[in-house]
Image (cartoon, coloured by chain):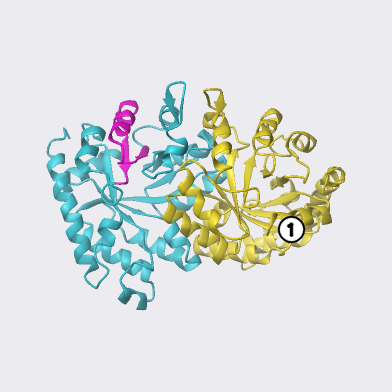
Chain colours: A cyan, B yellow
């Protein structure tokens, strides 16, 4: 998916919602455990009920991998099931030396046909560049994450710059706003503003709104650019809105609620 | 595997060799492609021929994942096949927010029964701690990698400290030398010495000897401690020593050659 296509979807659906698919057998409705593929069945019903309001889906590989080869099959089926007008982000947080990153890229971009993959920056340019060799595919680089541990290294300042700022400055030279996005947590407004200043044209994938305490209006105020530039992720608040047989209906309500909030902002963007 | 057991193996085999299992269908001998599971068949024969000289094996998940669910099966079979007196390091370079890292830990420590997993530090403490909750299992944290891109962030200095030093100082408080090791590339001797100074008792997993230009004697000089404290990895130089039907015999010769060099050092350690 190209940046122009993504922006067109945002305009069309009046939404910049990304739904995080983290299927956890301890949390999904009990009646699904009797199906032959509970992980896929859960994701399928979530996708069916939320796709009018979502422009992206983000399956997290950890929740599939922990079921071995069968979980891997469920992940492939889930990715294949996501409508083609939605951006598919494999939340895999991979990254290795060049040759090896190339294999991860093939796995997610060619075999699974995901549009994007989250990548960890610690190993530097040659761990990221192989992912940027695929046409119309995206790297979503971890810049400033929403978890507590982000303080340990990402916010470490040296010579007046935090590590996440150094990551942004360097990595912005590896790709373009057409093939690179950044993970920017919603939990600290002033930091979102610092990120936007450094990379004015890139899309951000923003976790941490809702469950983790981030606020949508604040994220838009400090993080949006003229063409939106945001994919705001919600996982638990949507997919676990109910643990009963009505889980897909409740997920739909939550997605719609977020989309409605987002529509107010989309109308103000210059797209 | 405990640290004491690992040290006992080093003493017994007079080796601190880790064999990296990176099975690449473009590089493995052609006759194996006719078998029902070429990835496993290749790894199996490499393990059969090298295990008297190796104290650890390090399958890299990228080379298996790129074959989908079938590749995942091959990875599980490979890990199950590695002799129990060898340390099994899943080279997966995972790391995510706490809950999610917990699932990765279950995947590799419980389902696959690996002894150790490589973890990327960028997301901080809560991305690493879940891996440290498993008895006799190890985190191998990326500190200073052997690739060119290590310069981008790991060597970035601020306030007189490089990022890899900050990673070492903080992370040494999360675990102990009994459940945490560090990836320390062999390519810069002076940096190995800096790492050893900060974490005198931890084991290092050292890539980059051989193919990437690192030298074993230099690594030992600057990186070893009294109880060895090193696992030196070799992948390509051993597993791709020959591309013919004699690949396992040639791999054995290369492993033996490294073990013989290592034995000279092991005799001098105070173990």
Give the quarter of the image for residue A140: top left
In the image, residue A40 sits, relative to residue B129, either above or below, namely below
Q: Which residue corresponds to the image point at 26% horizontal and 40% vertical from the top-left?
A: A230
Per the rendered image, the range of residues in magenta is A180-208
Q: Residue furthest top?
A: A159
- Near mark 1 (Cα within 10 A), the count class, few <14, some 14-19 or many ≥20, is few
Q: Is residue B21 magenta?
A: no
Is B261 positioned to the left or the right of A43 in the image? Answer: right
| Residue A191 placement (x, y as % from top left) | 33, 32
Q: Is residue A197 magenta?
A: yes
Query: The residue marked by circle 1 belongs to what chain?
Result: B
Give the quarter of the image for residue B85: bottom right
Give the quarter of the image for residue B216: top right
Is A107 positioned to the left or the right of A15 in the image? Answer: right
Specify whether residue B66 is in view. Answer: no
Quadrant of the frame with the C terminus of chain A: top left
Specify whether residue A18 is in view. Answer: yes
């Amino acid at each position: 998916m190209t940046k122009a296509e993504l922006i067109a979807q945002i305009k069309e659906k009046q939404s910049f919602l990304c739904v995080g698919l983290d299927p956890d057998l301890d949390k999904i409705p009990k009646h699904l455990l009797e199906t032959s593929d509970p992980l896929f069945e859960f994701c399928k019903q979530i996708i069916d009920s939320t796709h009018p309001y979502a422009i992206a889906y983000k399956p997290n590989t950890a929740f599939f991998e922990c079921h071995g080869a069968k979980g891997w099959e469920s992940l492939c089926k889930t990715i294949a099931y996501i409508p083609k007008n939605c951006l598919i982000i494999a939340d895999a947080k991979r990254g290795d030396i060049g040759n090896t990153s190339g294999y991860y890229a093939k796995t997610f971009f060619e075999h699974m046909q995901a549009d994007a993959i989250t990548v960890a920056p610690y190993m530097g340019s040659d761990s990221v560049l192989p992912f940027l060799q695929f046409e119309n595919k995206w790297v979503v680089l971890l810049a400033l994450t929403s978890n507590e541990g982000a303080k340990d290294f990402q916010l470490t300042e040296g010579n007046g710059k935090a590590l996440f700022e150094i990551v942004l400055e360097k990595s912005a030279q590896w790709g373009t706003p057409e093939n690179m996005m950044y993970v920017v947590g919603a939990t600290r407004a002033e930091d979102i503003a610092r990120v936007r200043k450094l990379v004015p044209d890139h899309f951000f994938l923003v976790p941490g709104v809702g469950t983790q305490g981030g606020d949508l209006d604040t994220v838009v105020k400090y993080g949006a650019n003229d063409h939106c530039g945001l994919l705001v992720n919600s996982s638990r608040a949507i997919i676990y809105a109910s643990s009963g047989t009505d889980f897909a209906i409740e997920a739909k309500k939550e997605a719609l609620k977020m989309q409605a909030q987002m529509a107010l902002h989309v109308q103000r963007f210059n797209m």
